[in-house]
């Protein structure tokens, strides 16, 4: 029978480094168990960490890929080991957990002895803490992977939106010029009493037609049509929510321009019918 151990103070509340993953504590008859897992820290560095300096036992196990190269097609070799630190068979229990979970790294189950010997149940606490610490690491890894996937998906979507916006900017420019041209023809026809409806198909312009053309070319709409094109915005560097908002706005602009064109064409058709009537 093992000797009764001296009771030790509770573990410190120091915030752990980002590469140490800590299990929820298990308390049983004043003894407290907490596991600390790290995929990167050397075993002894983890065992001697300030977080568990006051623990009665720092039960250590490790599992790392061996430098010995495996044969082609064979799984890699691993180097494993443990340190009971006074808790007989405890290190072997932690080592078994690392093997079962197929993870590499170091794990310490710290026990703060509460003055009462627990018997075999302590091994269940040790194993559960070790599993939970590794589970915390896996949760963090899954979260990182999910964020990475989200960024990749957003990157693809950002590229698609950027290309679409450039194409729509071009379409808007074409439709805007078309709308202005058709609206200009309607304006010419109205001002000239339908005389200028077919002005682009030949014939010399008289004084009235020349005056109308000058008025149309000097109008704000015509100035917009011939103004130099703006430099392309930096779409690839924009936030995806901003790109989506711009894409929605471009939809509205395209719909508006198409309505302008349809309206102008309808007006031209009506003017043409009026001209044909005796």
Image (cartoon, grey):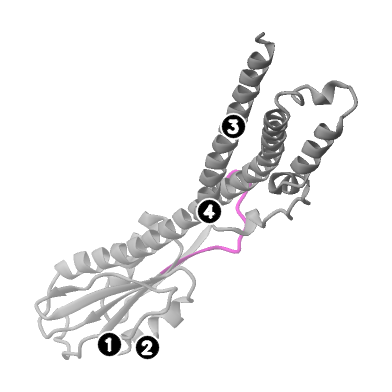
Q: Is residue 163 left or right of residue 82?
A: right
In front here: 250 or 110? 250
Q: Which element is circle 4 on?
A: helix
Q: Going from the N terminus, do you reach mark 4 or mark 2 first? A: 2
Q: Going from the N terminus, do you reach mark 4 or mark 1 first? A: 1
Pointer 1 local density, CA inside 10 Å: few below 14, some 14–19, many at least 20: few
Q: Going from the N terminus, do you reach mark 1 or mark 2 first? A: 1
Cβ atoms under marks 1 and 2 closer than 8 Å: yes
Measure how far apart labels 4 and 1 are at the Cα level: 44 Å
User: In the displayed structure, would residue 119 be above or below residue 143?
Assistant: below
Q: Which residue is mark 4?
A: 240
Q: Which residues are magenta?
A: 62-73
Measure how far apart labels 4 and 2 are at the Cα level: 44 Å
Q: Which residue is mark 1?
A: 12
Q: Going from the N terminus, do you reach mark 3 or mark 2 first? A: 2
In front here: 236 or 155? 236
Q: Which mark is residue 50?
A: 2
Instruction: For marks 3 and 2, give the one nearer the viewer.
Output: 3
User: In the displayed structure, would residue 203 be above or below residue 80?
Assistant: above
Q: Which mark is residue 102?
A: none
Instruction: For marks 3 and 4, give the one nearer the viewer.
Output: 3
Residue 102: quarter of image: bottom left
Measure how far apart labels 3 and 2 are at the Cα level: 71 Å
Q: Is residue 71 magenta?
A: yes
Instruction: For marks 3 and 1, give the one nearer the viewer.
Output: 3
**Residue drawn at 60 percent across, 36 percent down:** 257
- Residue 182's x, y, as percent? 69, 31
Q: Which residue is mark 3?
A: 258
């Amino acid at each position: 029978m093992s000797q009764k151990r001296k009771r030790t103070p509770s573990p410190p509340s120091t915030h752990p480094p980002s590469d140490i993953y800590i299990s929820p504590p298990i308390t049983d008859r004043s003894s407290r168990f907490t596991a600390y897992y790290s995929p990167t820290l050397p075993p002894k560095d983890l065992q001697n960490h300030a977080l568990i300096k006051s623990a009665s036992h720092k039960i250590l196990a490790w599992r790392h890929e061996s430098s010995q190269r495996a044969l082609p097609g064979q799984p890699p070799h691993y180097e494993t080991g443990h340190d009971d630190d006074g808790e007989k068979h405890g290190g072997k229990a932690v080592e078994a957990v690392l093997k079962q979970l197929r993870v590499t790294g170091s794990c310490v189950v710290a026990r703060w002895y509460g003055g009462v010997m627990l018997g075999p149940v302590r091994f269940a606490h040790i194993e559960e803490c070790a599993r939970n610490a590794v589970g915390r690491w896996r949760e963090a890894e899954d979260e990182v992977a999910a964020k990475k996937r989200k960024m990749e998906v957003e990157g693809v979507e950002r590229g698609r939106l950027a290309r679409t916006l450039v194409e729509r900017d071009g379409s808007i420019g074409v439709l805007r010029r078309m709308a202005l041209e058709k609206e200009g023809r309607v304006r010419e026809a109205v001002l000239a009493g339908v005389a200028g409806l077919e002005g682009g198909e030949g014939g010399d312009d008289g004084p009235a037609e020349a005056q109308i053309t000058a008025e149309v070319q000097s109008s704000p709409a015509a100035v917009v049509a011939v103004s130099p094109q703006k430099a392309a915005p930096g779409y690839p560097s924009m936030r995806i929510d901003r790109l989506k908002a711009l894409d929605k706005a471009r939809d509205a602009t395209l719909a508006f321009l198409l309505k302008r064109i349809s309206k102008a064409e309808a007006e031209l058709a009506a003017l043409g019918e009026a001209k044909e009537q005796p």
